[in-house]
């Protein structure tokens, strides 16, 4: 039995216009804070040995994911020290998936080689678009040329498991623009491609611009066309559509994210990191300075804790499973005491008749159209 480890690096070169994640431009914090933060992430793991994370201690981590923010915006020495230290602490299995998120504008060959030398075997690159206009609209720091060069550097360094993130539904983006981005991504041959619909999240620059009328989001029909185009082109190119937004070549599904979607156990380290262990969920304080102060005082950085009820666990397991092509066996919900009445199965049959679900005995899987209309399916089948 294994578990996932997530390490949050809440720093980036600059905040993107659409970003709602807990992250801070490195220019506002200084190099001393970056070094201090990495030191305290490693201290947190030691601090938690006898606390909530005790249950993780005898287990081997099956996945480690260093995300953000932009981990590769850290000074190289700090990122390598953090990576090496975390891997030493969490006892990864021999075949563990070890991922680091990266921005194409922050990568060098020497850094990529150092990551591989220190155990990283998967790189998740936030390309977002192969259109200069779209990158500018999103507030990204890199150019198309830098993105292409970064992919080449990753291959030269020795990465054989490369993931590229793409965004669609960008203001001003046409279907042809999106097709060009998809075709460019496919031509590069990454093992994994994620396609995310852009949304104007509260508190972001994009949200302010939309509310002020300065920016107009694309209409829903165009967004649906973009989703369907990605499904068509990526499937034709040999990628499995295994989750609403994720495609992978056979054998290259993101194991770390699959653990989330299957409601597995995971340990979060760092400011704003979330953890889950057998129905207990907790999260750390958001502010990295407050986080460091708490850890340095050997005080828990946990900001909130929740014990999930059996009903909550069953609901979460089912709703997350509806995001994945594999779906789930409804018999597994009985572990949580979930009661699935005849009226619920009637809804399942209705969704099946409308081409949104496939039902094989007790196993329920969403069709591609069902994944596209996940909100409708989830609403009708709330446990």
Image (cartoon, rainbow, N blue to C red):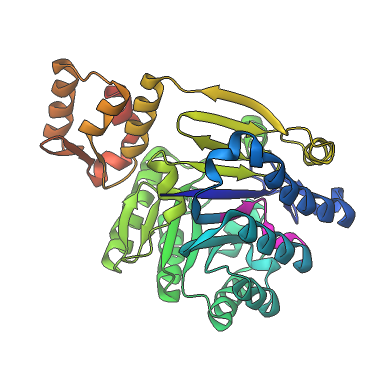
Q: Is residue 342 above or below residue 321?
A: above
The image quarter containing residue 205 is: top right
The reply to whether residue 341 is visible in this rendering is yes
Q: Residue at x 22, y 44 (%)?
A: 367
Q: Is residue 3 above or below residue 230?
A: above
Q: Within the magenta stretch, is there residue 245?
A: no
Q: Residue at x 78, y 48 (%)?
A: 40
Question: Is 346 placed left or right of 62 in the picture?
Answer: left
Which span is picked out in magenta?
Answer: 65-75
Could you say where residue 118 lies in the image, as x and y percent from the top left?
63, 71
Q: Nearer the viewer, residue 316 or 204?
A: 316
Q: Is residue 33 above or below residue 99?
A: above
Q: Is residue 169 above or below residue 125?
A: above
Could you say where residue 183 lies in the image, as x and y percent from the top left?
40, 69
Q: Residue at x 65, y 42 (%)?
A: 49
Q: Nearer the viewer, residue 266 or 109?
A: 266
The residue sitting at the bottom extreme is: 156
Q: Nearer the viewer, residue 106 or 285?
A: 285
């Amino acid at each position: 039995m294994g578990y996932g480890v997530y390490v949050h690096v809440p720093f980036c070169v600059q905040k993107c216009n659409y970003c709602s994640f807990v992250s801070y431009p490195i220019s506002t914090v200084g190099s001393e804070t970056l070094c201090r933060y990495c030191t305290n992430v490693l201290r947190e793991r030691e601090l938690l040995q006898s606390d909530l994370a005790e249950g993780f201690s005898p287990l081997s981590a099956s996945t480690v994911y260093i995300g953000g923010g932009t981990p590769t915006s850290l000074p190289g020495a700090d990122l390598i020290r953090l990576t090496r230290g975390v891997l030493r602490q969490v006892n990864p299995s021999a075949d563990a998936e070890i991922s680091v998120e990266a921005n194409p504008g922050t990568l060098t060959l020497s850094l990529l080689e150092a990551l591989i030398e220190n155990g990283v075997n998967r790189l998740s690159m936030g390309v977002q678009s192969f259109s200069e206009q779209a990158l500018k609209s999103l507030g990204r720091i890199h150019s198309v040329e830098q993105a292409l060069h970064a992919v080449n550097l990753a291959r030269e360094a020795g990465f054989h498991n490369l993931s590229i993130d793409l965004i669609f539904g960008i203001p001003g983006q046409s279907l042809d623009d999106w097709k060009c981005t998809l075709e460019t991504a496919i031509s590069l041959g990454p093992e994994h491609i994620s396609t995310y619909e852009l949304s104007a999240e509260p508190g972001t620059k994009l949200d302010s611009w939309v509310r002020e009328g300065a920016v107009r989001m694309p209409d829903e029909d165009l967004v649906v066309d973009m989703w369907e185009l990605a499904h068509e082109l990526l499937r034709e190119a040999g990628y499995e559509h295994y989750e609403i937004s994720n495609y992978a070549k056979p054998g290259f599904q993101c194991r770390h994210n699959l653990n989330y979607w299957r409601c597995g156990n995971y340990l979060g380290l760092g400011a704003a990191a979330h953890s889950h262990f057998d129905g207990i969920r907790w999260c750390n304080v958001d502010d990295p300075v407050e986080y460091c102060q708490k850890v340095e005082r050997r005080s828990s950085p946990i900001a909130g804790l929740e014990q999930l009820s059996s009903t909550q666990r069953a609901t979460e397991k089912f709703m997350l499973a509806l995001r994945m092509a594999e779906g789930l066996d409804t018999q597994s919900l009985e572990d949580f005491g979930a009661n699935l009445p005849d009226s619920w199965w009637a809804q399942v049959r209705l969704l099946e008749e409308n081409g949104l679900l496939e039902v094989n005995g007790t196993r329920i899987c969403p069709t591609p159209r069902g994944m596209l209309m996940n909100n409708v399916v989830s609403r009708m089948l709330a446990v």
